[in-house]
């Protein structure tokens, strides 16, 4: 005689500490799954890592010759922190595409049928994307150094700048997770991607907001990417344009506050959406 086995109840620990360790182990398994895609799809990885470098080269050498920074500063040193912030923000596109692909292939459905922590899929996605973003950030830093960019602050200021960039990426990651699940289909993801680019360029990443119409410049000043770019410029002691706007004077505060607000909004939305998928 045979009997049905409830896989969802197998090997589940009962103590709080044991459950936490079980959830961490499952999350690490999911992280390794995502990282294994790097070895299987090296072309996609190389293109993803090279694209920010190509953008930096294009703006620094094709457009930068006609740009002038207040005080006679080097435009590459003004541009580079903006490109770092833009790269971290645009990382949400990769998150959306990968998550939507898993949803459409039924991968998430297979995982939720297994005796594993429900949080593992999202935590694993988050960890893998943050690792990939750190690698991308380091490559971009290396490219900037080769192109002549330098930071003029101390080691601690440099670490703080990288921390602000990763904080922005963490916030955009949860936005990408939610938008990816909300879109559901690759066609809708492409629509969201089209909207992301204008928002990204509506910032002080490439030029001063003083060159924009007053109403547009005010919007750009309050863009989370502008706050991070300005704060990173300050920490790297790179040149920038002076501005009397409150957002510019308090860029460091906003570079922390904006990501925290975005996480506070999109983290619960993403978790709730995922719970409905797993219901």
Image (tube, grey):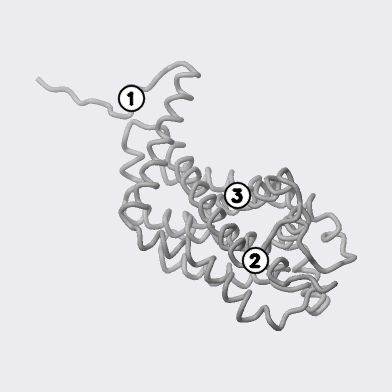
Circle 2 sits on which residue?
148
Picture coordinates of residue 151 (x, y %)? 71, 56
> Looking at the image, which residue sits at the far top?
15
Query: Mark 2 against mark 3, which lies toward the viewer?
Result: 2
* Quadrant including the N terminus: top left
Circle 1 sits on which residue?
9
Which is more N-terminal, label 3 or label 2? 2
Q: Is there CB contact under 8 Å for labels 1 and 2?
A: no
Query: Mark 1 against mark 3, which lies toward the viewer?
Result: 3
- Could you say which disc has been placed on residue 200 in the image? none
Circle 3 sits on which residue?
266
Q: Nearer the viewer, residue 34 or 81?
A: 81
Describe the element under mark 1 as helix, strand or loop.
helix
**Disc 1 versus disc 2: distance between alpha carbons?**
58 Å
Q: What crowding class fits label 2: few (fewer than 14 Cα within 10 Å), some (14-19), or many (20 or more)?
A: few
Residue 58 is drawn in which quadrant? bottom right
Residue sitting at x 35%, y 47%: 36
Q: Is there CB contact under 8 Å for labels 1 and 3?
A: no
Is 119 located above or below residue 137 in the figure?
A: above
Q: What crowding class fits label 1: few (fewer than 14 Cα within 10 Å), some (14-19), or many (20 or more)?
A: few
Left or right of 1, for residue 151:
right
Left or right of 77, for residue 131:
left
Q: Nearer the viewer, residue 102 or 166?
A: 166
Describe the element under mark 3 as helix, strand or loop.
helix
Picture coordinates of residue 175 (x, y %)? 57, 54
* Quadrant including the C terminus: top left
Which is more N-terminal, label 3 or label 1? 1
């Amino acid at each position: 005689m045979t009997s049905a086995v409830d896989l969802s109840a197998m090997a589940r620990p009962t103590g709080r500490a044991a459950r936490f360790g079980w959830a961490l182990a499952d999350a690490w398994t999911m992280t390794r799954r995502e990282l294994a895609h790097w070895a299987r799809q090296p072309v996609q990885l190389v293109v993803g890592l090279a694209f920010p470098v190509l953008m930096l080269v294009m703006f620094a050498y094709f457009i930068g010759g006609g740009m002038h920074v207040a005080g006679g500063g080097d435009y590459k040193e003004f541009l580079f922190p903006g490109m770092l912030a833009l790269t971290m923000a645009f990382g949400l596109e990769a998150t959306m595409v990968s998550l939507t692909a898993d949803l459409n292939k039924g991968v998430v459905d297979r995982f939720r049928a297994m005796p594993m922590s429900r949080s593992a899929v999202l935590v694993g996605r988050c960890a893998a994307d943050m690792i990939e973003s750190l690698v991308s950030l380091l490559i971009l830093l290396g490219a900037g150094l080769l192109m002549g960019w330098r930071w003029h602050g101390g080691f601690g200021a440099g670490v703080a700048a990288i921390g602000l960039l990763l904080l922005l990426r963490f916030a955009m990651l949860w936005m990408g997770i939610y938008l990816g699940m909300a879109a559901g289909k690759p066609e809708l993801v492409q629509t969201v991607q089209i909207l992301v680019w204008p928002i990204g360029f509506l910032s002080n990443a490439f030029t001063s907001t003083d060159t924009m119409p007053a109403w547009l410049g005010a919007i750009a000043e309050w863009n989370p990417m502008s706050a991070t770019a300005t704060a990173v410029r300050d920490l790297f002691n790179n040149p920038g344009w002076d501005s009397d706007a409150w957002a510019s004077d308090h860029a460091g505060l906003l570079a922390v506050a904006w990501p925290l607000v975005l996480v506070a909004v999109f983290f619960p939305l993403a978790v709730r959406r995922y719970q409905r998928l797993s219901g």
